[in-house]
Image: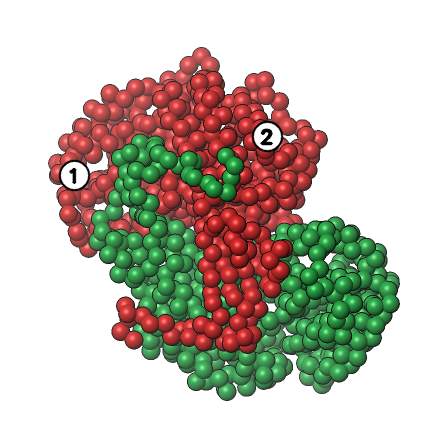
Chain colours: A red, B green
Amino acid sequence: MTFPPRQEHPMSNVAPTTPEQLDVILDAARAAVPIWSATAPSERARVLIAVADALDADAERLVGIAQRETGLSEARLRGELTRTMVQLRLFADVIREGSYLDARIDEADDRFVLGTRPELRRVLTPVGVALNFSASNFPFAFSVAGGDSAAALAAGLPLVVKAHSGHPELSVATAEVVAAAARAAGAPDGVFALVVGQAAGTAALEDDRVDVASFTGSIRVGRLLADKAAARPRPILFFGELGSVNPAYVTAAALAERSDQLASGFVASVAGSAGQLCTKPGFLWIPGGADAAAFEDAVARHAAAAAEHRLLNPGIGAAYLARREAVLAAEGVRLVAEGSVRTDDDGQVWASPTIAAISAERLQPGDETLLDEVFGPFSLIVEYDDEAALADRLDALYEGNLTGTVHTGSGEQSPSLSALVARLQRKVGRVLFNGWPTGVAVTYAQQHGGPYPATTNDSSTSVGTAAITRFLRAVAFQDAPQDVLPPSLRDDNPWGIPQRREPAGVSQAWGRRADPGSSV
Amino acid sequence: MTFPPRQEHPMSNVAPTTPEQLDVILDAARAAVPIWSATAPSERARVLIAVADALDADAERLVGIAQRETGLSEARLRGELTRTMVQLRLFADVIREGSYLDARIDEADDRFVLGTRPELRRVLTPVGVALNFSASNFPFAFSVAGGDSAAALAAGLPLVVKAHSGHPELSVATAEVVAAAARAAGAPDGVFALVVGQAAGTAALEDDRVDVASFTGSIRVGRLLADKAAARPRPILFFGELGSVNPAYVTAAALAERSDQLASGFVASVAGSAGQLCTKPGFLWIPGGADAAAFEDAVARHAAAAAEHRLLNPGIGAAYLARREAVLAAEGVRLVAEGSVRTDDDGQVWASPTIAAISAERLQPGDETLLDEVFGPFSLIVEYDDEAALADRLDALYEGNLTGTVHTGSGEQSPSLSALVARLQRKVGRVLFNGWPTGVAVTYAQQHGGPYPATTNDSSTSVGTAAITRFLRAVAFQDAPQDVLPPSLRDDNPWGIPQRREPAGVSQAWGRRADPGSSV
């Protein structure tokens, strides 16, 4: 998400965490590392499920606070809270099943190809204390009890969450629910804490007691924090999810088949949550010509029917107004659907979708005004003449993105389409076909990440079960007695998890595996 | 490894890569990305095996050059070359088997717990172009055709290797063998190249055409390069393996049981390859008292029998002399085995093992003279009085390490031993029992990495099959037609790899998984 530099909001009644309080919090988190990391997955799962149940029980109150603080609709917030609970429950399953631990056992081997091999057992293990910076635009699902929090707690890390200034009271209320539920379910002291204020968040990131950090927010702030994490005397991994403009492409065949359906879906994806989603399609490429005009008429019609929506906070509202105005003032940009914008007495900005259009040749590499993200209910239709050029234009215009979308005709195949899809795979984390990128399923095969600046570290995902590995590192045990091994690596396998076992004697045949798929 | 700042060696006949040459190399590597990343694993495996076979065929010549350039023994270099070939063949197996791809398929689900779920398919995919900085101390196994090179090529990344200045002619000779074998086996142009010189290496690291880098070397140079990688306009992951002092601990029971055997194993581990190994035990903690004196006598006897060995190059030799002298001059340090040191007419340093001893209370946190790595055939015996204090002393004295070792008595168990092992697990990448950390098996369950400064990024390993994942990121495909999916994700599964499949309809039960291990 792209924001201009701005002041923090007044934190209503919520006081910033003092350096002394932070010190106590980090000491407690550090002290909890050996306890929580050694807690059986089934016990950690019990805590996650207890937290989900507690959020469920308090849903009405929490959603009410969130509505007031963020301006998001009740339906959206209820759905988001459900997603938050599902994330916690899903991670409970993941850690009890145990394949995320990647447990590997190499048997001792006196016929090993490089001389005698000792017994080696390797498993993923929590890296220490996690720090999670909450997002403005998902007060539940990417905040105090959100995806990264669920993943860190599931992985076995004590967790410190930095509250987002856009929903401070909700952050405190959620943290109280989480802390009470976790404590009641048997979690040790220090496993969970909330810190408030930029100063405390930055100090925590730079503190040696923190071992890994995650973040969802703007490129500017995310890069600033990533640089701090990398510059520490002991650098740590920083998983920042930053900006994305999510280009979408419509082929001529798709447009000819279902213009109105595409227009309706596009507007809904831009309008939802007032466009304040990391996966909002910021650019829609359509073939120019007569079909384009009809499509844009349909877009204007659907956009006009979209309700006005409050933006998350005055800072985001002001940034939206400025970016929208800048794009609309750029040469060659024309309005398709003007959309409303107004600022109320509290400084909150209200808007309905604005859609503009431009011809493809006007879009030039490095044009930040047109190419940078507009965070809010805005999107730019790009009319192209040459489908065969789309792949190269993608490379030239866009940096890394969370998603890329293609809309194709029924059964359509073409070299230019193949080239576009191949290029998208190297530019984004998720390639969609005939759908819209907003609405990110929380499941096993989800990938929410992408090359920089979509993320600062593309080795992981921030949605879905694979997120858990970002909080883990491997440890190997060589010739260890059974009683000192973690349960995940013991021969009696008390947790019943998958263990990959490499028997003695087979290494002599390495590189000589039968390969029916090869002619060699 | 710890070196002082030093000049590069004269590169004999090997000219540094010019900026113009580097530009051509990086363009070719970039152009090879779509081709090599889409090449079937069985074809990439064929290339890896062809490279291994070609190295095998040229072993005598390559080992001869390596002997001359590094001073390492023929036996060691032959073993190392064998390990290099085994790595290549093992990675060929790994990519043909395919579980490294972590292929996941979530079926479309209209009863999904968060509303309709689209079909999602997720697989790991090469991140682009890899840059590998060679090591001084492993002219084969961590250099041009070494572990990171094998992993990058196996993963599907075009590879640029920066030659180490300590063995330039070997680097060129190896690169010629690799390039010819790869070409003959059908690898596309641009898949492999060598660059020579610090300037070319740094320029490549900072070039946007490079997407990931790996390194084995000193803390000073590794941190410098890691900082450059993080400061790029588009930051990239940098997997640096830096310094490690590998503390080893001997309990009173172990010492009572097998003092001479421990002394002999310790000296052999310190003396091997003139102590120029990342996993050399730099500290050996033993209980003080009468048994200590007998142990040290045995150490002196074994050390006196160890042959003189040339250090890798004059720079490393000079650094060894300086570090050895500084430690021996520190208060409280006494010699156990003086060892020889001499400098020959070519400026090469020759040495036999020097072992010193100190009492535990003299070893204080932050004492860089005593605690920093001494790269070469030196180790410090630390005599302790209080076994119960070892775990806390470990935390206070040492940063992250590649390995940590405990030598125990037969069947020994104690709270202090458990505490030490627990603490080691959080401080190192590999915990050994009753063995020595040098000699790193290349296999599935190996972990060669550890918390900073052992590595700059502890999410991976630089030895063993798990190394391959450092060069991969995930991409998800949503509702993609079968014909545009990569073969790894297709229903017909032409590569025959493991695919994790999440059926429709089960998400309603998430978090309600039967868990026989829990009382809930």
Snapshot quadrant of residue B332: bottom right
Horizontally, residue A492 falls left or right of residue B266, namely: left
Q: CA distance from mark 2 to mark 1?
A: 55 Å
Per the image, label 1 sits on a secondary structure element best described as: helix
**What's the residue at 73%, 79% (across, down)?**
B351
Point out which mark residue A182 bears. Answer: none
Q: Which of pointers 2 and 1 lies earlier in the amino acid sequence?
A: 2
Q: Amino acid at mark 1?
A: Leu
Q: How many numbered circles are shown?
A: 2
Query: Residue at (26%, 74%) from the top-left corner?
Result: A519
Say which residue label 2 marks.
A183
Q: Which mark is residue A255?
A: 1
Q: Label 1 neighbourhood size at 10 Å, few (<14), some (14-19), many (20+)?
A: many
**Picture residue at 41% right of the left edge, 52% below the top:** B473
Tags 2 and 1 both on a single chain? yes
Please state the horizontal and vertical placement of residue A104, each as a whole percent of the image.
49, 59
The three-letter code of the residue at mark 2 reads Arg
